[in-house]
Image: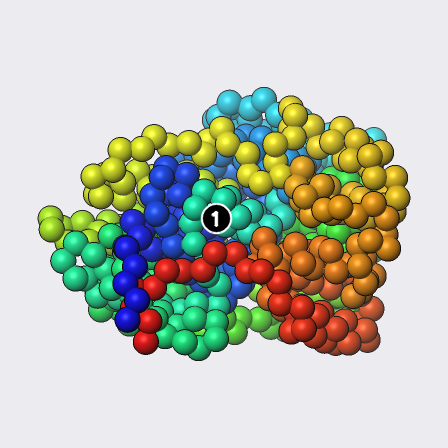
Amino acid sequence: MTQGSPYDLLVVGGGINGAGIARDAAGRGLRVALVEQDDLAGHTSSSSTKLIHGGLRYLEYREFGLVRKALQERETLLRSAPHIIRPLRFVMPHMPNLRPAWLIRAGLFLYDHLARRELLAGSRGIVMRRHPAGAPLVDSIERGFVYSDGWVDDARLVVLNAVDAAEHGAAVATRTRLVKAVRSGSEWDAELVGADGTPFTVRARALANAAGPWVGTLLHDALGRAAHHTVRLVKGSHIVTRRLFDHDHAYIFQNPDKRIIFAIPYEHEFTLIGTTDVEYHGDPARVSIDEDETRYLCESINRYFKRKISPADVCWTYSGVRPLLEEEGADNPSAVTRDYRLELDAREGEAPLLSVFGGKITTFRKLAEEAVDRLADALGRSAPAWTAGAPLPGGDIPGAQFERFATRFASEHPWLPAELARRYAHAYGTRAVRMLGEARSLAELGQPLVPGLFECELRYLHDTEWARCADDVLWRRSKLGLHLPADTLTEASASIDAWFAREPAAAPATLTPAQQH
């Protein structure tokens, strides 16, 4: 039996909230362990609409506090990671039969002024025939509105929070499942099963349940406790088609059922369309789009675009289960709040337990800050919040001027093809130089496993970002899988998996067990 000193905090769940909590806590000097049963961002946090936004439609449900909080965070996040988060202009065509123009103007005025705005342009009205965004739309749409929000590479946002947590001393273990945790006085004894199937135990002075859709299951099954809050599982599905328009604006479309649908420029060659809101009662790990959702999204788009699409035009789909905070009287899934609640069980003399219910990707940093404030207080630790002004790894770009940085990076690496240089700049920011290492030519990047993916990057993703298989690389840490011909995807995945199997690189720091069985 090997004894190890206890962690201050064990975080369960490697989605955006768990990674954010681990980062914040480690940066305050707490000894932190983060465990995730699958890959980082393996479920909900890589299946969003990929927006950093206040949530314009939430104003209609009078969620002014949530919108204001999200708008404040929008500015903070744009500064912290300009390589993976960027401003995006949205076009809302005016449909008089759905919402009157005065109501939209009033909502946009609030959206512009509920929080301080420095990086993004304000809203305005447009005449469609005079704006590039009008060309793809049906001729009956004459006017509209334009406003600003942000776009994010959601899976990379999670990974970069975990990387920062690790660089502040946290131990991060993926493919590691919490089986059971029991209080032993002022500590938790947590039974875990590692990636290789080996069981072991760690001790922690506090536990954070950030398991997303599994928050209630974890409380009941692994911790043997009841919760005062519950989550409502709502499936959100997206479809991806070949590019439906040539400009760089996104669209927000109003539907007759009062829902809204986004159409967003995606990965240069594609258009991302979503999302649905469907009550879900199955296993969150096995969620997928159904025919009705695909048809619904196609019909929603066809109300607005001249070019009609059908399910046959869909190149890729993804679905995620959003764990929304359950409220009385919210029968419509679209009306369920996107705010969050933190439930802290911190009885005197017993190890604290904090559970996270609900939330949205835009407010993850604030959620994490509030969570660690409460946990630090329960642990008797005094440490100031720090993440509001701290860049994420690769985000220390002067003035948050990404285009200037990308131009400089390309000029300093003229041997990189322009498209590859830009992808590296977007994915890794200032860390792209670290990823390239000593390479000074394409040949020195190693063997290309698939077009645009070299051994050098794979090794970095394994050693620094916990990538362990093809899906981790092709669909989460990048979207290279979307660009591969469908008939080559199986072979490409197999070659990457084979590389991981034969080239085990040095892994990041692992957990220190209290007991080794």
Camera-side residue of 321 and 353: 353
Residue occupying the point 67% across, 73% down: 502
Which image quadrant for residue 462?
A: bottom right
User: In which quadrant will I find the C terminus?
Assistant: bottom left
In percent of width and height, residue 28 lies at: 37, 37
- Return the residue at label 1: 166
Instruction: Decide which of 341, 280 is in the foreground and name it.
Output: 341
Badge 1 crowding class, 10 Å Cα cut-off, few under 14, some 14 to 19, many 20 or more, is many
Q: Depth check: give the residue in front, 199 or 251.
A: 199
Residue drawn at x 55%, y 60% as measured from the top left: 507
Q: Quadrant of residue 456?
A: bottom right
Residue 166 visible at all: yes
For the residue marked with disc 1, what is the amino acid?
Ala
Position of residue 249 measured from the top left corner of the image (x, y, whole percent): 74, 39
Left or right of 185? Residue 119 is right
In the image as oriented, which residue stretches furthest toward the front?
2
Which residue is nearer to you in this view: 505 or 46?
A: 505
Residue 149 in view, yes or no: no
Judge left or right: residue 275 versus residue 22. Answer: right
Q: Is residue 132 above or below residue 245?
A: above
Disc 1 secondary structure class: helix
Residue 473 pos. (x, y %): 66, 61
Image vertical order of residue 77 relative to residue 453, above or below: above
Scheme by which the image is coloured: rainbow
Total labels: the figure holds 1
Q: What residue is rendered at 50% in x and 32% in y?
A: 390
Q: Is residue 95 left or right of residue 414?
A: left
Q: Residue at x 36, y 75 (%)?
A: 199
Q: Position of residue 1 (x, y in %)?
A: 28, 71
